[in-house]
DNA sequence: CAGTTAAGGTTACAACATATCATCAACGCG
DNA sequence: CGCGTTGATGATATGTTGTAACCTTAACTG
């Protein structure tokens, strides 16, 4: 069982469901948070916290420190609105917040684009493998570096 | 098919096979490289390049710059003597250089210990999943964050 | 010996991440 | 109302991770 989720549902819809998910968790959807989410969601590539800081600074016409960006990105990650790409030290919007998976990302070393796929069977196998050794899995990190179809 | 490799084969043996693997690739096994490999191999946990720099500096009684350490670690990674743990920005010795796998690491968030397991079937599934979408996988990154049996 | 190459040294800097303390607005409540 | 509390953000500093550019040295080769 393998489901591929192509990104780029419409920006507005994504924004709304992100907001709903955050509020459902008892958190506020502030202007600052909306601005940061908008920047991350506008990109198909993982963006670094510093890139976000720069873009949000521009958008708001005043400097936003990396500090503040990290705080909010961490909140987003904790609530599954945004995923961290470990192998890139960067962040990408979750195209379907509210729906929790162990995500698998395909990251193109040439153009930087990240594709989000899910395969619950693989993820479960990874968790099981860990459990077999007495290890309690909290968060599998499954990322594939390589070359995307466009860059071939 | 699932094989678990416990670490801590004897230091000397590991050192020898690492040296053999590097020389087989046409690279030199210098004092500096031996020193760096020794530091990494002495640890059961992933070590940061800066930690390595500090320890090698001590061991040699003179400062070794991170720069030099990165150069050599990169060489080791390229030749499979050492693996990079992406989710920890750190490095760990490969307990069986020469034998190439897509590695799976279980990293304890409590004590930092990393256990290296391999499951070629899972790794192959991940590669296949990527290929199905037209993505050419170069290097799967499969790491599981969680809690080890000792820290439970 | 001159020319070339590979290894490592030195310095500087860029990119990523966190710590600490201050400010401010919103809210609850005596 | 005024006061204390809480949550969000700002400001500043610092810590950690990673690279770039250029130089020196040793070894090998013609």
Image: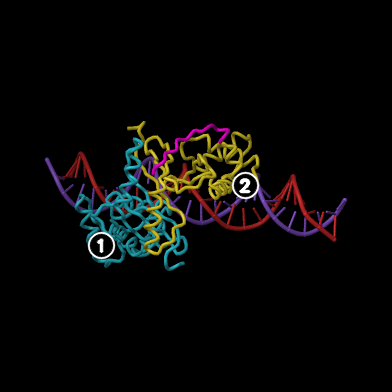
Chain colours: A yellow, B cyan, C red, D purple
Residue A3 part of the magenta segment? yes
Disc 1 element = helix
Q: Which residue is mark 1?
A: B15
- In this rendering, is residue A4 above or below B75? above
Which residue appears at 53% of the width and 38% of the height?
A40
Q: x and y percent of residue D26 in the render?
A: 23, 54
Q: Is residue A117 left or right of residue D9?
A: left
Q: Is residue A151 visible?
A: yes
Label 1 chain ID: B
* Disc 2/disc 1 C-alpha distance (Å): 54 Å
Q: Is residue B96 left or right of residue A28?
A: left
Instruction: Report the quarter where the N terminus of chain A lies.
Output: top left
Q: Is residue B97 left or right of residue A97?
A: left
Q: Which residue is mark 2?
A: A24
Q: Which of the 4 image quadrants contains residue A4?
A: top left
- In this rendering, is residue A39 above or below D4? above
Report the magenta residues as a range. A1-13
Q: Which mark is residue A91?
A: none
Residue B139 part of the magenta segment? no
Disc 2 element = helix
């Amino acid at each position: 069982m393998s489901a591929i989720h192509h990104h780029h549902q419409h920006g507005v819809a994504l924004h709304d469901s992100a907001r709903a998910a955050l509020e459902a968790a008892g958190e506020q959807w502030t202007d600052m948070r909306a601005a940061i989410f908008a920047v991350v969601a506008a990109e198909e590539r993982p963006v670094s916290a510093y890139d976000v800081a720069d873009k949000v600074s521009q958008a708001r016409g005043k400097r936003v420190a990396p500090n503040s960006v990290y705080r909010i990105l961490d909140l987003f990650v904790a609530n599954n609105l945004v995923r961290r790409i470990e192998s890139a030290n960067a962040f990408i919007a979750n195209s379907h917040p509210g729906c929790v998976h162990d995500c698998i990302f395909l990251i193109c070393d040439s153009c930087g684009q990240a594709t989000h796929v899910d395969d619950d069977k693989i993820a479960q196998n990874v968790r099981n493998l860990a459990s077999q050794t007495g290890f309690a899995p909290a968060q599998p990190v499954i990322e594939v570096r390589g070359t995307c179809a466009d860059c071939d």
